Amino acid sequence: MPLVEFHNYSMGFKDDDGNVSNLIDNLSFSIDEGKALGVVGESGCGKSMTSLSLMRLLPDAAVVQSGKILFDGKNVLEMSEKEMEVIRGNRLSMIFQEPMTSLNPVLTIGNQIGECLLLHHPDLAPDEIRARTIRSLESVGINNAEARLSQYPHEFSGGMRQRVMIAMAIINHPALLIADEPTTALDVTIQAQILDIMKGLKGDSGGLMMVTHNLGVVAEICEEVVVMYAGRAVERGTLKAIFDEPLHPYTIGLMSSIPTMTSDKSELPAIPGSVPTIYDFGKGCRFADRCSKCMERCMREVPKSLLVGKDHIVACWLYPEGEVV
Ligand SMILES: Nc1ncnc2c1ncn2[C@@H]1O[C@H](COP(=O)(O)OP(=O)(O)OP(=O)(O)O)[C@@H](O)[C@H]1O
Ligand code: SF4
Ligand SMILES: [Mg+2]
């Protein structure tokens, strides 16, 4: 049984009049225990909303429209807040996209990490909490960890704070760690260090859902990939299938703009135009207005997700043959 399964999940946002516009549309994918899945796509494609849906931490304006999200076989969308509190930060954990705003400025680093541990293990003795907190800081490469416990977030650099966020996210050895752009806010040297830490964590921490713009990061860490465009999974498959035989014009476009460690995000992507907002989605394929292969049908009909090879799924009218999944 997979650890995580999204089944035809759809969500959107309601406006001031209460009208709901869809963002994530019929999203399906799964993550097996101990495996790493990359979720890729440009800014605004719905990657963070996908992660926050699984964590049940969507913003107030968000509305779940349909589908299921199973974690350990249970639908998180039907869990009570109390049940979620038991798994969140414990079996299911997340490194948030904005680490700088996720730490409490008035609490010491030691207190904040210790709190994550205590919340799920209230019987632990203070000495044990301290020892585990030190070990977790050391595991993400923070030197002199014991002395660092009594310091506050402002005494840490950006890269250090990101390491603290990782330490907090993994302290309870989650079965799934969601990393939402864990390196984007950092300079390239620190990015490389954090990626090395993430690679080292794989296996230790169970499964990984790596959310990123950066296909280079995915290539280094993940076994499977979901390519998202404007709230839809346009292509899914093994790393090899997506990298060696990309089929969807959007995936092909992303591939041609694979960054190196020295290129910056503003150089991407090579695809003309930009991701539409939820109010501008067309009736058919949401990529249609940027696609050089666009046909008449694409404007009218939503492409079906078809199985086109072993574990390789694509949703594009260029590939009309295959089993509907
Ligand atoms: N309150 C809201 N009302 C309408 N649309 C919203 C609202 N909040 C977010 N959105 C839309 O959701 C989409 C952003 O989704 P999300 O944050 O998941 O993208 P992302 O793929 O994580 O992007 P990035 O790479 O920039 O982090 C955008 O299209 C945005 O306009
Ligand atoms: S369905 Fe049509 S518009 Fe959409 S990606 Fe495929 S060819 Fe392009
Ligand atoms: Mg995001």
Image (cartoon, helix red, strand yellow):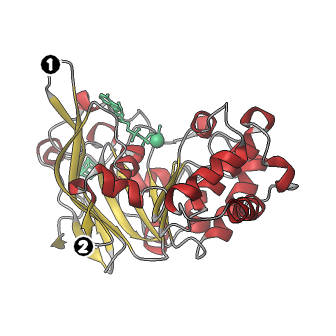
* Residue 314 screen position, x and y as percent: 29, 63
* Residue 206 screen position, x and y as percent: 52, 73
* Callout 2: SS: strand
* Residue 173 screen position, x and y as percent: 56, 68
Task: Say left or right for 99 vs 196.
Answer: left
In which image quadrant can residue 60 be found? top left
Foreground residue among 79 and 251: 79
In which image quadrant can residue 74 be found? bottom left
Query: To which residue does mark 2 refer?
Result: 307
Q: Amino acid at mark 2?
A: Leu
The Cα atoms of the two marked residues, 2 and 1, are separated by: 39 Å
Question: Dots 2 and 1: beta carbons under 8 Å?
Answer: no
| Within-10-Å neighbours for mark 2: few <14, some 14–19, many 20+ | many
Q: Residue at x 55, y 48 (%)?
A: 181
Query: To which residue does mark 1 refer?
Result: 17
Is there any visible trace of residue 199 in the rendered image?
yes
Vertical side of 176 occupied by 83: above or below:
above
* Callout 1: SS: loop
Task: Say left or right for 107 vs 88.
Answer: right
Foreground residue among 261 and 101: 101
Mark 2 vs mark 1: which is more N-terminal?
Answer: 1
Q: Residue at x 52, y 41 (%)?
A: 269
Q: Amino acid at mark 1?
A: Asp
Q: Residue at x 31, y 65 (%)?
A: 29
In which image quadrant can residue 184 be found? top right
Frontmost of labels 2 and 1 is 1
Q: Is mark 1 within 8 Å of ligand 1?
A: no
Q: Is mark 2 within 8 Å of ligand 2?
A: no
Task: Say left or right for 86 vs 34.
Answer: left
